[in-house]
Amino acid sequence: MTDYLLVDRLEKRFSSHGRAAFKDVSFSIGQGEFVALIGPSGCGKSTLLHIMAGLSQPTAGTVRLAGEPIEKPRPEMMFVFQQYTKSIFPWKTVLDNVLLGVKYRSKAARDVLEKICRDHLELVGLGRYGDYFPYQLSGGMQQRVAIARALARRPQILLMDEPFSALDAMMRVELQDLLLKLWSELKLTVLFVTHDLDEALYLAQRVIMLSASPASVAEDVRVPLPYPRRQIETRSDPVYLQLRERLYRSMVTQVMASRTDVPETAA
Amino acid sequence: MSWLKGILWESRLSGVLLIALLLAFWQLSAMYLVHSPTWPTVTRIFEAWFENVADGTLMTHLIATLWRQMLGFGLAVVLGIALGLAMGYYKALYNLFEPLVETLRPIPGPAYLPLLVLFVGIGSEMKVVLILVASLFPILLNTYSGVRSIDRVQFDTARTLGLTTMQTFRELVLPAASPQILTGMRISLAISLILAILGEMIVSNDGLGYFVLLSQRTFKVPEMYAGIFTLALFGYVLNRVFVRIEAKLVRWHHESSGVI
């Protein structure tokens, strides 16, 4: 089952300047795994995630889910966007936003669907907020709505594109722990894109690091830290610190190497 | 006296008082300064207004104007939104129609009048078509620019949620563009009244535009002013009603963008 979600020699070139954002990127994710994908900004990690979600097409290579190539968004994969103010529709109440994910998929009666959605709002700690509008909620709560909407569709995989990077530190800590709880309770497979090394190490079982542009897989390391993880203890664990140093070195090397390259014409 | 100051400047009372003051000045000037049939007293105008309201004359003309205005405006709304949504959503349709729209748009509405008289005649249909043509463009333009400014993330969201094209229109495109669509509609509402009055002044036998012009031509000057006052009142009420509806429909927009 290690090849549950397989990325095979993926490449993305932008037609406007012909330069590759990444090339020859290959890795695979096992079912139930929590993997973090990190890399310097501009290395195309977000683009990679969009391609994996079927939202964008690669210029070469394939993404396979349980052996089947992904060409368009699949119901068993849900995407959580960084820009929650946009991906949560501001003209709908919280409940209606969550409902949007299920009402066209299921023939179940409206009240049954509403119950499912309210249960999922409960799951992310927003049980009382169904009738609120997004603008009445904080950023952290809005991103919870997005997570509830994704989960209400009972996906097997969550693809998350820097979902907490726009939140303040306290909110981020809260949502990290919520995500870990949901991951273990619902037996999800999570691919989590972030530029924050600490966040990657704290959350994931495995960290994949992309090099600077044109990116490829630079590191692919296991994080041998037990769950449940704890914000203070885990982050001060010697194993954590050692791994952090190693990955940080690697990241700095990547960035430095890309700087000494022949300067590119400004993109 | 500070309470008086508060009421005066912190509310719109001052604005209402200004209107009352101007009317009083008008009244006094007509009584003592300017003795001319073209400058009747305010009381004489209100007298004429009450007479024409009482015998139903103004109501008949008002309904005639309202009817053709709403018909032309309503058709412009339906056409403008439908075409605008399609142009905003499908790049090919935008490329096909946008140059044409940009060419036709600068033509002032009244310029269509002689042309329409040739093709549609001088009846009510001509006025409805005139109103339709002139109020179409603000709605059309605002609709497609509203759709085109929808964020990519929102379309991606719709796709990951597996929405079909029709569902995407209903759940995302139409509501997301609605603040801009309503702005276009508000502009067109004002335009539609202007064109209705113009059409009635050029060729008609009813409507407020006809009433005002006829009063002037038959030297019923107080009636002419009464007609103009009626138009002011009518336009004001129309706009208020629209703003109310708009505020209700896009409350989320004002609240989430911090504009009240």
Image (tube, helix red, strand yellow):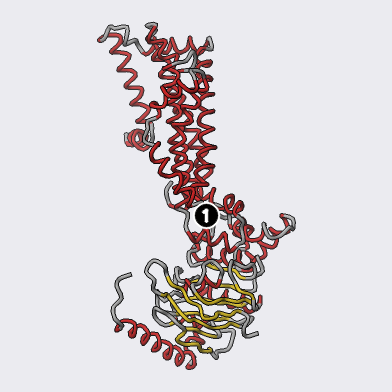
- Between B57 and B247, which is closer to the camera in this rendering? B57
Q: Amino acid at mark 1?
A: Pro
Residue most extreme to the left: B33
Q: Quadrant of residue A178?
A: bottom right
At 53% from the left edge and 12% from the top edge, which residue is drawn? Answer: B56
Above or below B78: residue B58? above
Q: Which residue is mark 1?
A: A90
Q: Quadrant of residue A256?
A: bottom left
At 50% from the left edge and 87% from the top edge, which residue is drawn? Answer: A220
- Between B247 and B12, which is closer to the camera in this rendering? B247
Could you tell me which secondary element the residue under label 1 belongs to? Answer: loop
Location of the N terminus of chain B (image quadrant): top left
- Between A254 and A35, which is closer to the camera in this rendering? A254
Disc 1 packing (10 Å; few <14; some 14–19; many ≥20): many
At 48% from the left edge and 41% from the top edge, which residue is drawn? Answer: B182
The x and y percentages for residue A176 are 53, 76
Taking the image as shown, residue B248 lies to the left or right of residue A249, namely right
The x and y percentages for residue A65 are 62, 76
All told, the count of numbered labels is: 1
Query: Residue under mark 1: which chain is it in?
Result: A
The x and y percentages for residue B11 are 38, 35
The x and y percentages for residue A102 are 66, 60
At 45% from the left edge and 79% from the top edge, which residue is drawn? Answer: A23
